[in-house]
Image: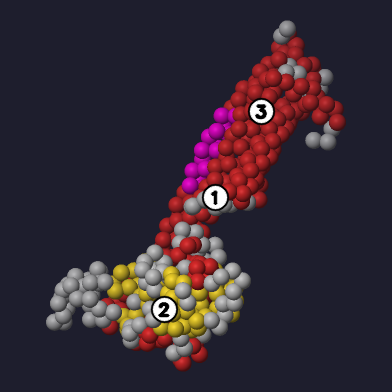
Amino acid sequence: MFNRDRWDEILEALNANKFRTLLSAFGVFWGITILVLLLALTNGLKNGVTAGFGNFATNSMFVWTQQTSKPYKGLPKGRRFNFKLDDVAALKNDFPQLKYVSPRNQLGGYSGANNVVRGTKTGAFQVNGDYPEFINQQPMDILQGRFVSYSDINANRKVCVIGTGVVNGMYDKGEEVLGTYIKINGVNFMVIGTFKVSNSQGDKEEDANTIFVPFTAFGQAFNFADNVGWLALTAHDGTSITTIKPQIMESLKNRRKVHPEDDRAIGNFDLSEAFGRVNGLFSILGLVGYFVGALVLMSGIIGISNIMLIVVKERTKEIGVRRALGASPWTIKSQILQESLILTILSGMVGITFAAGVIWALNYALDANGPVENFANPSVSMSVVITALFILVVSGLLAGLIPANSATKMKPVDALRID
Protein backbone atom coordinates (compact mmCIF):
# COMPACT_ATOMS: atom_id res chain seq x y z
CA MET A 1 0.00 0.00 0.00
CA PHE A 2 2.87 2.43 0.73
CA ASN A 3 5.07 1.50 -2.22
CA ARG A 4 5.39 4.55 -4.48
CA ASP A 5 6.29 2.46 -7.52
CA ARG A 6 3.14 0.41 -7.00
CA TRP A 7 1.00 3.56 -6.94
CA ASP A 8 2.68 4.87 -10.09
CA GLU A 9 1.86 1.58 -11.83
CA ILE A 10 -1.76 1.72 -10.68
CA LEU A 11 -2.23 5.30 -11.92
CA GLU A 12 -0.58 4.43 -15.22
CA ALA A 13 -2.86 1.44 -15.67
CA LEU A 14 -5.99 3.50 -14.91
CA ASN A 15 -4.90 6.31 -17.25
CA ALA A 16 -4.02 3.94 -20.09
CA ASN A 17 -7.62 3.96 -21.30
CA LYS A 18 -9.46 6.80 -19.55
CA PHE A 19 -12.77 6.33 -21.32
CA ARG A 20 -12.90 2.66 -20.39
CA THR A 21 -11.97 3.49 -16.80
CA LEU A 22 -14.72 6.11 -16.57
CA LEU A 23 -17.34 3.75 -17.96
CA SER A 24 -16.41 0.99 -15.51
CA ALA A 25 -16.32 3.44 -12.60
CA PHE A 26 -19.74 4.90 -13.51
CA GLY A 27 -21.53 1.66 -12.58
CA VAL A 28 -20.18 1.79 -9.03
CA PHE A 29 -20.78 5.55 -8.83
CA TRP A 30 -24.41 5.14 -9.87
CA GLY A 31 -25.01 2.11 -7.64
CA ILE A 32 -23.75 3.75 -4.46
CA THR A 33 -25.64 6.96 -5.34
CA ILE A 34 -28.91 5.04 -5.71
CA LEU A 35 -28.26 3.20 -2.43
CA VAL A 36 -27.65 6.37 -0.40
CA LEU A 37 -30.54 8.30 -2.01
CA LEU A 38 -33.00 5.43 -1.45
CA LEU A 39 -32.09 5.29 2.24
CA ALA A 40 -32.28 9.09 2.57
CA LEU A 41 -35.71 9.26 0.91
CA THR A 42 -36.96 6.39 3.08
CA ASN A 43 -35.72 8.25 6.15
CA GLY A 44 -37.40 11.45 4.96
CA LEU A 45 -40.70 9.61 4.53
CA LYS A 46 -40.29 8.08 8.00
CA ASN A 47 -39.57 11.49 9.55
CA GLY A 48 -42.65 12.98 7.89
CA VAL A 49 -45.00 10.18 8.94
CA THR A 50 -43.74 9.97 12.53
CA ALA A 51 -44.00 13.76 12.80
CA GLY A 52 -47.71 13.25 12.20
CA PHE A 53 -47.81 11.73 15.69
CA GLY A 54 -46.65 15.12 16.97
CA ASN A 55 -44.93 15.12 20.32
CA PHE A 56 -47.63 12.95 21.84
CA ALA A 57 -46.29 10.22 24.13
CA THR A 58 -46.29 7.23 21.79
CA ASN A 59 -46.81 4.70 24.61
CA SER A 60 -50.41 5.90 24.86
CA MET A 61 -53.95 4.98 23.90
CA PHE A 62 -57.27 6.82 23.73
CA VAL A 63 -60.57 5.37 24.93
CA TRP A 64 -64.11 6.67 24.36
CA THR A 65 -67.68 5.41 24.71
CA GLN A 66 -69.98 4.39 21.85
CA GLN A 67 -73.30 2.54 21.57
CA THR A 68 -73.67 -0.90 23.09
CA SER A 69 -74.29 -3.71 20.59
CA LYS A 70 -75.45 -6.34 23.11
CA PRO A 71 -77.93 -6.27 26.00
CA TYR A 72 -76.43 -6.90 29.44
CA LYS A 73 -77.77 -7.18 32.99
CA GLY A 74 -81.22 -5.95 32.01
CA LEU A 75 -79.84 -3.00 30.04
CA PRO A 76 -80.92 -2.79 26.36
CA LYS A 77 -78.88 -3.02 23.20
CA GLY A 78 -78.12 0.37 21.61
CA ARG A 79 -77.65 2.09 24.98
CA ARG A 80 -75.45 5.17 25.16
CA PHE A 81 -73.36 5.80 28.25
CA ASN A 82 -70.46 7.91 29.52
CA PHE A 83 -67.31 7.34 31.51
CA LYS A 84 -67.27 8.96 34.95
CA LEU A 85 -64.56 10.58 37.04
CA ASP A 86 -64.57 7.60 39.41
CA ASP A 87 -63.44 5.45 36.43
CA VAL A 88 -60.27 7.56 36.34
CA ALA A 89 -59.59 6.93 40.03
CA ALA A 90 -60.26 3.20 39.56
CA LEU A 91 -57.85 2.92 36.63
CA LYS A 92 -55.10 4.71 38.57
CA ASN A 93 -55.64 2.38 41.52
CA ASP A 94 -55.99 -0.90 39.58
CA PHE A 95 -53.23 -0.31 37.03
CA PRO A 96 -49.99 0.95 38.59
CA GLN A 97 -48.39 0.47 35.14
CA LEU A 98 -50.24 3.60 33.99
CA LYS A 99 -48.19 6.76 34.25
CA TYR A 100 -50.97 9.18 33.29
CA VAL A 101 -54.75 8.82 33.14
CA SER A 102 -56.22 12.03 31.72
CA PRO A 103 -60.00 12.49 31.49
CA ARG A 104 -61.04 14.84 28.72
CA ASN A 105 -64.15 16.64 27.53
CA GLN A 106 -64.48 18.55 24.29
CA LEU A 107 -66.69 21.34 23.02
CA GLY A 108 -67.09 22.75 19.53
CA GLY A 109 -64.41 22.75 16.89
CA TYR A 110 -62.36 25.26 14.93
CA SER A 111 -64.31 24.44 11.76
CA GLY A 112 -67.73 24.52 13.48
CA ALA A 113 -70.05 27.31 14.61
CA ASN A 114 -68.79 30.41 16.43
CA ASN A 115 -68.44 29.61 20.13
CA VAL A 116 -65.94 32.20 21.38
CA VAL A 117 -66.54 35.94 21.70
CA ARG A 118 -64.25 38.78 22.71
CA GLY A 119 -65.63 42.25 22.25
CA THR A 120 -66.72 42.52 18.63
CA LYS A 121 -64.69 39.50 17.53
CA THR A 122 -66.03 35.97 17.27
CA GLY A 123 -64.45 32.66 16.37
CA ALA A 124 -65.00 28.92 16.11
CA PHE A 125 -62.48 27.05 18.24
CA GLN A 126 -62.08 23.67 19.87
CA VAL A 127 -62.38 23.81 23.66
CA ASN A 128 -60.91 20.98 25.75
CA GLY A 129 -61.51 20.35 29.44
CA ASP A 130 -58.29 18.79 30.76
CA TYR A 131 -56.21 17.89 33.78
CA PRO A 132 -52.63 19.20 34.20
CA GLU A 133 -51.12 15.80 33.24
CA PHE A 134 -52.15 16.24 29.63
CA ILE A 135 -49.21 18.57 28.92
CA ASN A 136 -46.92 15.61 29.72
CA GLN A 137 -48.74 13.42 27.22
CA GLN A 138 -48.79 16.02 24.45
CA PRO A 139 -45.87 18.35 25.15
CA MET A 140 -46.44 21.90 24.02
CA ASP A 141 -44.45 25.11 24.10
CA ILE A 142 -45.94 27.58 26.59
CA LEU A 143 -45.22 30.95 25.02
CA GLN A 144 -46.67 33.10 27.80
CA GLY A 145 -48.02 32.37 31.28
CA ARG A 146 -48.65 28.74 32.25
CA PHE A 147 -50.77 25.64 31.69
CA VAL A 148 -53.71 24.68 33.94
CA SER A 149 -52.74 23.46 37.43
CA TYR A 150 -54.31 21.41 40.21
CA SER A 151 -55.10 24.60 42.11
CA ASP A 152 -57.27 25.56 39.11
CA ILE A 153 -58.87 22.10 39.19
CA ASN A 154 -59.60 22.18 42.93
CA ALA A 155 -60.94 25.75 42.92
CA ASN A 156 -63.00 25.33 39.71
CA ARG A 157 -61.26 28.40 38.32
CA LYS A 158 -62.61 29.63 34.99
CA VAL A 159 -59.23 30.13 33.34
CA CYS A 160 -57.94 29.06 29.95
CA VAL A 161 -54.80 28.53 27.88
CA ILE A 162 -55.18 29.49 24.21
CA GLY A 163 -53.32 28.50 21.04
CA THR A 164 -51.60 30.87 18.65
CA GLY A 165 -54.51 30.63 16.20
CA VAL A 166 -56.89 31.88 18.89
CA VAL A 167 -54.52 34.75 19.71
CA ASN A 168 -54.32 35.78 16.05
CA GLY A 169 -58.08 35.54 15.59
CA MET A 170 -59.25 37.26 18.76
CA TYR A 171 -56.52 39.84 19.48
CA ASP A 172 -54.89 42.68 17.59
CA LYS A 173 -51.18 42.48 16.88
CA GLY A 174 -49.13 43.45 19.94
CA GLU A 175 -52.18 43.46 22.22
CA GLU A 176 -51.70 42.09 25.76
CA VAL A 177 -53.26 38.63 26.11
CA LEU A 178 -52.61 37.45 29.68
CA GLY A 179 -55.24 38.54 32.18
CA THR A 180 -57.87 39.30 29.53
CA TYR A 181 -61.20 37.50 29.23
CA ILE A 182 -62.84 35.56 26.43
CA LYS A 183 -66.42 34.32 26.46
CA ILE A 184 -66.89 30.62 25.63
CA ASN A 185 -70.54 29.70 24.99
CA GLY A 186 -71.57 32.68 27.11
CA VAL A 187 -69.20 31.96 30.04
CA ASN A 188 -66.21 34.22 30.77
CA PHE A 189 -62.75 32.64 31.11
CA MET A 190 -59.56 34.49 31.98
CA VAL A 191 -56.53 33.81 29.76
CA ILE A 192 -53.57 32.57 31.83
CA GLY A 193 -51.31 31.30 29.04
CA THR A 194 -50.66 30.88 25.33
CA PHE A 195 -49.10 27.88 23.60
CA LYS A 196 -48.07 26.24 20.38
CA VAL A 197 -47.65 22.54 19.68
CA SER A 198 -44.23 21.85 18.21
CA ASN A 199 -43.45 19.30 15.48
CA SER A 200 -47.10 19.00 14.60
CA GLN A 201 -48.17 18.16 11.06
CA GLY A 202 -51.59 17.43 9.63
CA ASP A 203 -53.51 18.86 12.62
CA LYS A 204 -51.27 21.91 13.04
CA GLU A 205 -54.10 24.32 12.29
CA GLU A 206 -56.44 22.53 14.69
CA ASP A 207 -53.79 22.55 17.43
CA ALA A 208 -53.30 26.31 17.04
CA ASN A 209 -57.06 26.87 17.26
CA THR A 210 -57.51 25.01 20.55
CA ILE A 211 -58.40 26.31 24.02
CA PHE A 212 -57.60 24.37 27.21
CA VAL A 213 -59.63 24.94 30.38
CA PRO A 214 -59.57 23.07 33.74
CA PHE A 215 -61.68 19.89 33.60
CA THR A 216 -63.77 20.83 36.63
CA ALA A 217 -64.54 24.35 35.40
CA PHE A 218 -65.45 22.89 32.01
CA GLY A 219 -67.93 20.47 33.60
CA GLN A 220 -69.46 23.19 35.77
CA ALA A 221 -69.73 25.82 33.03
CA PHE A 222 -71.13 23.57 30.33
CA ASN A 223 -73.19 21.13 32.44
CA PHE A 224 -71.02 18.04 31.92
CA ALA A 225 -71.07 17.23 35.65
CA ASP A 226 -68.72 14.26 36.27
CA ASN A 227 -69.12 12.83 32.76
CA VAL A 228 -65.94 12.07 30.84
CA GLY A 229 -65.91 12.25 27.05
CA TRP A 230 -62.75 10.23 26.56
CA LEU A 231 -59.56 9.13 28.29
CA ALA A 232 -55.91 9.54 27.33
CA LEU A 233 -53.86 6.74 28.93
CA THR A 234 -50.05 6.58 28.99
CA ALA A 235 -48.07 3.67 30.42
CA HIS A 236 -44.68 3.83 32.13
CA ASP A 237 -41.68 3.36 29.86
CA GLY A 238 -41.10 -0.19 31.05
CA THR A 239 -44.62 -1.31 30.04
CA SER A 240 -46.25 -1.32 26.62
CA ILE A 241 -49.76 0.11 26.72
CA THR A 242 -50.72 -2.56 24.15
CA THR A 243 -49.99 -5.42 26.58
CA ILE A 244 -52.33 -4.08 29.28
CA LYS A 245 -55.02 -2.81 26.90
CA PRO A 246 -57.23 -5.98 27.20
CA GLN A 247 -57.30 -5.70 31.02
CA ILE A 248 -58.10 -1.97 30.83
CA MET A 249 -60.97 -2.59 28.44
CA GLU A 250 -62.30 -5.41 30.63
CA SER A 251 -62.21 -3.17 33.70
CA LEU A 252 -64.04 -0.32 31.94
CA LYS A 253 -66.70 -2.68 30.57
CA ASN A 254 -67.29 -4.14 34.01
CA ARG A 255 -67.62 -0.68 35.62
CA ARG A 256 -70.02 0.61 32.93
CA LYS A 257 -72.11 -2.59 32.84
CA VAL A 258 -71.17 -3.50 29.28
CA HIS A 259 -71.22 -7.09 27.99
CA PRO A 260 -67.68 -8.54 28.16
CA GLU A 261 -67.87 -9.56 24.48
CA ASP A 262 -69.28 -6.24 23.27
CA ASP A 263 -66.34 -4.85 21.30
CA ARG A 264 -68.33 -1.96 19.83
CA ALA A 265 -69.37 -0.29 23.06
CA ILE A 266 -65.95 1.21 23.85
CA GLY A 267 -63.79 2.60 21.09
CA ASN A 268 -60.04 2.87 21.34
CA PHE A 269 -57.00 3.98 19.39
CA ASP A 270 -53.68 2.43 20.38
CA LEU A 271 -51.02 4.99 19.48
CA SER A 272 -48.24 2.63 20.58
CA GLU A 273 -49.46 -0.10 18.26
CA ALA A 274 -49.82 2.32 15.35
CA PHE A 275 -46.35 3.73 15.99
CA GLY A 276 -44.91 0.21 16.09
CA ARG A 277 -46.52 -0.63 12.73
CA VAL A 278 -45.04 2.51 11.19
CA ASN A 279 -41.57 1.69 12.51
CA GLY A 280 -41.90 -1.87 11.23
CA LEU A 281 -42.95 -0.64 7.79
CA PHE A 282 -39.97 1.68 7.50
CA SER A 283 -37.60 -1.01 8.71
CA ILE A 284 -38.80 -3.13 5.79
CA LEU A 285 -38.45 -0.17 3.41
CA GLY A 286 -34.89 0.33 4.67
CA LEU A 287 -34.07 -3.30 3.88
CA VAL A 288 -35.65 -2.90 0.43
CA GLY A 289 -33.49 0.20 -0.10
CA TYR A 290 -30.35 -1.75 0.77
CA PHE A 291 -31.44 -4.65 -1.46
CA VAL A 292 -32.24 -2.52 -4.53
CA GLY A 293 -29.13 -0.38 -4.05
CA ALA A 294 -26.98 -3.50 -3.68
CA LEU A 295 -28.39 -4.94 -6.93
CA VAL A 296 -27.57 -1.75 -8.83
CA LEU A 297 -24.14 -1.65 -7.21
CA MET A 298 -23.56 -5.30 -8.15
CA SER A 299 -24.01 -4.46 -11.82
CA GLY A 300 -21.25 -1.87 -11.46
CA ILE A 301 -19.00 -4.37 -9.71
CA ILE A 302 -19.51 -6.88 -12.52
CA GLY A 303 -18.53 -4.15 -14.99
CA ILE A 304 -15.30 -3.43 -13.09
CA SER A 305 -14.53 -7.15 -12.88
CA ASN A 306 -14.94 -7.50 -16.66
CA ILE A 307 -12.73 -4.49 -17.29
CA MET A 308 -10.05 -5.89 -14.98
CA LEU A 309 -10.15 -9.18 -16.91
CA ILE A 310 -9.47 -7.24 -20.10
CA VAL A 311 -6.65 -5.34 -18.36
CA VAL A 312 -5.09 -8.60 -17.18
CA LYS A 313 -5.28 -10.02 -20.70
CA GLU A 314 -3.62 -6.90 -22.12
CA ARG A 315 -0.82 -7.13 -19.56
CA THR A 316 -0.23 -10.88 -19.87
CA LYS A 317 3.29 -10.46 -21.22
CA GLU A 318 4.13 -7.94 -18.46
CA ILE A 319 2.88 -10.39 -15.84
CA GLY A 320 5.00 -13.13 -17.43
CA VAL A 321 8.12 -10.95 -17.19
CA ARG A 322 7.39 -10.19 -13.54
CA ARG A 323 6.93 -13.87 -12.76
CA ALA A 324 10.13 -14.75 -14.64
CA LEU A 325 12.05 -12.16 -12.57
CA GLY A 326 10.88 -13.79 -9.35
CA ALA A 327 7.61 -12.01 -8.49
CA SER A 328 5.43 -14.27 -6.34
CA PRO A 329 1.79 -15.08 -7.28
CA TRP A 330 0.63 -13.04 -4.28
CA THR A 331 2.57 -9.98 -5.53
CA ILE A 332 0.79 -10.15 -8.89
CA LYS A 333 -2.55 -10.90 -7.27
CA SER A 334 -2.24 -8.05 -4.73
CA GLN A 335 -1.52 -5.51 -7.48
CA ILE A 336 -4.64 -6.52 -9.44
CA LEU A 337 -6.72 -6.44 -6.27
CA GLN A 338 -5.32 -3.05 -5.31
CA GLU A 339 -6.13 -1.57 -8.73
CA SER A 340 -9.69 -2.88 -8.51
CA LEU A 341 -10.05 -1.64 -4.93
CA ILE A 342 -8.77 1.86 -5.73
CA LEU A 343 -11.06 2.19 -8.74
CA THR A 344 -14.08 0.99 -6.75
CA ILE A 345 -13.44 3.19 -3.70
CA LEU A 346 -12.73 6.34 -5.74
CA SER A 347 -15.87 5.95 -7.86
CA GLY A 348 -17.90 5.05 -4.77
CA MET A 349 -16.69 8.07 -2.80
CA VAL A 350 -17.63 10.32 -5.71
CA GLY A 351 -21.07 8.68 -5.66
CA ILE A 352 -21.47 9.28 -1.92
CA THR A 353 -20.41 12.93 -2.38
CA PHE A 354 -22.87 13.38 -5.24
CA ALA A 355 -25.69 11.79 -3.20
CA ALA A 356 -24.85 14.09 -0.26
CA GLY A 357 -25.17 17.07 -2.60
CA VAL A 358 -28.59 15.88 -3.81
CA ILE A 359 -29.75 15.39 -0.20
CA TRP A 360 -28.54 18.89 0.70
CA ALA A 361 -30.45 20.34 -2.27
CA LEU A 362 -33.63 18.49 -1.22
CA ASN A 363 -33.40 19.84 2.33
CA TYR A 364 -32.68 23.34 1.04
CA ALA A 365 -35.77 23.18 -1.21
CA LEU A 366 -37.91 21.94 1.70
CA ASP A 367 -36.68 24.76 3.94
CA ALA A 368 -37.26 27.36 1.24
CA ASN A 369 -40.72 26.19 0.12
CA GLY A 370 -42.12 25.00 3.46
CA PRO A 371 -42.81 21.49 4.79
CA VAL A 372 -44.33 18.76 2.63
CA GLU A 373 -46.96 16.53 4.21
CA ASN A 374 -45.56 13.15 5.29
CA PHE A 375 -42.02 14.03 4.18
CA ALA A 376 -39.33 15.82 6.18
CA ASN A 377 -35.55 16.06 6.53
CA PRO A 378 -34.31 13.34 4.13
CA SER A 379 -30.92 12.29 5.49
CA VAL A 380 -28.65 9.37 6.28
CA SER A 381 -26.64 8.72 9.41
CA MET A 382 -22.91 8.18 9.64
CA SER A 383 -23.57 4.47 10.14
CA VAL A 384 -25.02 4.36 6.61
CA VAL A 385 -21.92 6.06 5.20
CA ILE A 386 -19.65 3.64 7.08
CA THR A 387 -21.76 0.71 5.81
CA ALA A 388 -21.48 2.06 2.26
CA LEU A 389 -17.69 2.30 2.61
CA PHE A 390 -17.57 -1.28 3.90
CA ILE A 391 -19.66 -2.40 0.91
CA LEU A 392 -17.26 -0.57 -1.41
CA VAL A 393 -14.21 -2.29 0.08
CA VAL A 394 -15.80 -5.74 -0.14
CA SER A 395 -17.07 -5.00 -3.66
CA GLY A 396 -13.64 -3.83 -4.80
CA LEU A 397 -12.02 -7.02 -3.52
CA LEU A 398 -14.70 -9.18 -5.16
CA ALA A 399 -14.35 -7.30 -8.45
CA GLY A 400 -10.61 -7.94 -8.55
CA LEU A 401 -10.62 -11.49 -7.23
CA ILE A 402 -11.43 -13.32 -10.49
CA PRO A 403 -9.03 -11.26 -12.64
CA ALA A 404 -6.31 -11.65 -9.97
CA ASN A 405 -6.71 -15.41 -9.90
CA SER A 406 -6.65 -15.48 -13.70
CA ALA A 407 -3.39 -13.50 -13.72
CA THR A 408 -1.62 -15.98 -11.43
CA LYS A 409 -2.80 -19.21 -13.10
CA MET A 410 -0.80 -18.70 -16.28
CA LYS A 411 2.76 -20.04 -16.32
CA PRO A 412 5.51 -17.43 -16.91
CA VAL A 413 6.80 -19.28 -20.02
CA ASP A 414 3.34 -19.33 -21.62
CA ALA A 415 2.77 -15.68 -20.77
CA LEU A 416 6.03 -14.63 -22.44
CA ARG A 417 5.06 -16.41 -25.68
CA ILE A 418 1.91 -14.30 -26.10
CA ASP A 419 2.39 -11.37 -28.49
- Quadrant for the C terminus in the image: top right
Q: Is label 3 in a helix, a strand or a loop?
A: helix
The residue that appears at 38% across and 85% down in the rendered structure is 221
Residue drawn at (71%, 12%), measured in percent from left and top? Answer: 414
Question: What separation in Å lies between label 3 and label 2 (alpha carbons)?
Answer: 69 Å
Note whether 331 is above or below 275 in the view shown: above
Can you identify the residue that label 1 sits on?
Answer: 44
User: Which is more N-terminal, label 1 or label 2?
Assistant: 1
Q: Residue 165's spot in the image, x, y percent? A: 51, 67
Mark 2 and mark 1: span between their CA atoms?
41 Å
For label 2, the residue is 184
Inspect this view and state whether residue 204 appears: yes
Disc 3 + disc 2, Cβ < 8 Å: no
Q: Which residues are magenta?
A: 285-300
Residue 355, given in percent of the width and then of the height, sits at 63, 40
C-alpha gap between disc 3 and disc 1:
29 Å
Residue 9 versus residue 185 in the image, above or below:
above
Residue drawn at the location 61% of the way across and 71% of the way down: 174
> Disc 3 or 2, which lies upstream in sequence?
3
Outermost right residue: 4
Q: Which mark is residue 25?
A: 3
Asked if the residue under mark 1 is in contact with the one under mark 2, i.e. CB atoms within 8 Å, the reply is: no
